[in-house]
Image (cartoon, rainbow, N blue to C red):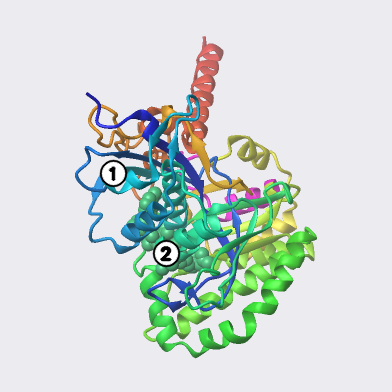
């Protein structure tokens, strides 16, 4: 006897997104609406994504959730219960696509509870938009499970917004605006796609992880203090954001990197200025973040044009946008200025790392960037993700399922760190640098490009040792 009918189980994945014009501050904490509209790039799901399995059964006695293998209390998590309740309210008749059989009539859904197992393939709550990917994935997966029908366009994004504001933007690929909306019921505070993922295929992002630790001040509490105390934030929302949104959307649509990059950097700087203007002040960026900023400006100054653009969320990690023609050179200089710990892969994309290693970087550029950074220290940047623009949520197959049909319980366990020889044993921090352990089991580790890069490095090293031994013979 199984705990749930496999036809009442869905597994989905959803991407993260990184805002280029930031959401910071709530107009209504109850409805989770913003004081200003925002816009973001959806990142590709190759490296960073949330994966969520949801199953419904009459035999489940309550709604339950496992996050990254650990059970969390659902009842006490208002955002979670709100999202489940709102998607459930849109439930329709659930029909077996193959046979046409009605599996659950709309009227019967109140008799069902859900079990949810979710994991992130990257650090959770570290300022890498895990809540965005996580709540977008949950909303999307529940909508598939319940055969939910929107009563107006964008309703699912309005639901995801109530899990985490930035999550509404992860329901679309490409370049996405979250419009703040005007209505009292906030039904128009929804995400809208500005351009799809095919619009600007040359756009690239390098993510320099300065810390994968859980951040000290959550976005929710940080923005609450900012709204209460920062006059700069008030002025920004009232007068500065709208024209900047119009400018960056036009730049994105025209694939004008200089315009896009400048607006991105200016807005990131202003967001962190509002954090400093908050009382007591909030510091998300650290010395490494500031050195990354200087390095990007030195790169642009050398080229006499904006060819790389940083942005920082509520944490010290930099997301640096650039284009396909500059990404290898940018990675080459940044790897010299911010070397990852000895033994770790230079970045998640082994082919790009090899291209960067072979780059003939002009001496003057290297000197400019190294001069802008204080002494390069291995480990200030722990890892670098190389990624690009991506699509919205996807429905996955049973191979990715994380709930056991026999027991109804979570099957995912965060894998142990990789073998010391595989990657980061030489970390000065003594930590695991491969985010494979944020992913799932062996398949999760293999899907992790850091692990693939590490294995390639190990294999290359083994070939080198064998060749040297042959030479000695
Ligand atoms: N896959 C997931 N499924 C459901 N909820 C998730 C998932 N991932 C994260 N969350 C929720 O989001 C919280 C983390 O959100 P938080 O805003 O603190 O961090 P972040 O999203 O990584 O950072 P930021 O939003 O500043 O970029 C987690 O504690 C959890 O409640
Ligand atoms: C700095 C940001 O990343 C803030 C994101 O905040 P959240 O969406 O995590 O906040 P809540 O709505 O309280 O869950 C900027 C952005 O993504 O626009």
Foreground disc of the pair 1, 2:
1
User: Whereabouts is ligand 1, in terms of quadrant?
Assistant: bottom left
Residue beneath the point at 30% across and 49% down: 110
Q: Percent from the top left, x then y, of residue 262? A: 70, 69
Visible residue check, residue 99: yes
Q: In this view, does 222 lie above or below 1?
A: below
Q: In this view, does 159 lie above or below 459?
A: below
Q: Percent from the top left, x then y, of residue 438? A: 38, 43
Image quadrant for the N terminus? top left
Q: Does the magenta stretch include residue 351?
A: no
Mark 1: secondary structure: loop
Residue beneath the point at 52% across and 14% down: 472
Part of the protein shown in magenta:
328-346
Which quadrant of the figure has residue 464?
A: top right
Q: Nearer the viewer, residue 217 or 374?
A: 217
* Location of mark 2 (residue): 162
Q: Distance between the residues labelled 1 and 2?
A: 22 Å
Q: What mark, if any, has residue 112 been given in the picture? A: 1
Say whether disc 1 or disc 2 marks the residue closer to the N-terminus: 1
Q: Which residue lies furthest to the top in this view?
A: 473
Q: How many marks?
A: 2
Residue beneath the point at 44% across and 51% down: 139
């Amino acid at each position: 006897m199984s705990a749930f009918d496999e036809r009442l189980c869905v597994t989905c994945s959803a991407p993260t997104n990184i805002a280029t014009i930031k959401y910071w501050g709530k107009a209504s904490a109850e409805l989770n609406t913003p004081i200003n509209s925002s816009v973001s790039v959806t990142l590709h799901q190759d490296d960073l994504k949330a994966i969520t399995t949801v199953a419904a059964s009459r035999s489940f006695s309550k709604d339950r959730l496992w996050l990254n293998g650990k059970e969390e209390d659902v009842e006490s998590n208002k955002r979670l219960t709100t999202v489940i309740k709102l998607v459930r309210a849109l439930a329709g008749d659930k029909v077996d696509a193959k046979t046409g059989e009605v599996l659950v009539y709309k009227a019967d859904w109140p008799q069902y509870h859900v079990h949810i197992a979710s994991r992130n393939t990257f650090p959770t709550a570290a300022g890498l938009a895990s809540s965005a990917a996580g709540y977008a994935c949950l909303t999307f997966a529940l909508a598939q499970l319940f055969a939910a029908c929107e009563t107006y366009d964008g309703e699912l994004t309005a639901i995801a917004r109530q899990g985490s504001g930035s999550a509404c933007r992860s329901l679309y690929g490409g370049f996405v605006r979250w419009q703040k909306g005007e209505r009292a019921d906030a039904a128009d505070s929804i995400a809208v796609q500005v351009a799809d993922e095919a619009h600007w295929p040359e756009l690239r992002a390098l993510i320099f992880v300065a810390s994968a630790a859980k951040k000290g001040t959550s976005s929710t509490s940080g923005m609450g203090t900012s709204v209460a105390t920062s006059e700069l934030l008030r002025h920004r929302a009232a007068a500065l954001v709208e024209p900047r949104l119009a400018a960056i959307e036009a730049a994105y649509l025209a694939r004008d990197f200089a315009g896009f990059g400048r607006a991105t950097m200016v807005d990131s700087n202003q967001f962190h200025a509002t954090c400093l203007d908050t009382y007591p002040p909030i510091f998300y960026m650290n010395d490494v973040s500031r050195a990354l900023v200087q390095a990007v400006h030195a790169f642009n100054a050398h080229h006499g044009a904006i060819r790389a653009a940083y942005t920082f969320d509520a944490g010290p990690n930099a997301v640096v946008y650039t284009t396909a023609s500059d990404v290898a050179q940018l990675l080459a200089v940044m790897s010299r200025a911010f070397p990852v710990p000895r033994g770790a892969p230079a970045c998640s994309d082994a082919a790009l790392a090899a291209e960067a290693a072979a780059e003939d970087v002009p001496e003057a550029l290297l000197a400019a960037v190294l001069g802008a950074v204080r002494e390069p220290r291995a480990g200030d940047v722990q890892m670098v993700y190389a990624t690009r623009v991506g699509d919205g949520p996807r429905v996955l197959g049973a191979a990715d399922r994380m709930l056991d049909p026999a027991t109804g319980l979570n099957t995912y366990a965060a894998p142990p760190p990789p073998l010391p020889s595989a990657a980061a044993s030489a970390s000065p921090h003594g930590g695991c640098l491969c985010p494979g352990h944020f992913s799932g089991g062996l398949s999760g580790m293999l899907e992790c490009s850091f692990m693939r890069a590490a294995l390639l490095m190990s294999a290359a090293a083994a070939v080198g040792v064998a060749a040297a031994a042959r030479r000695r013979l």
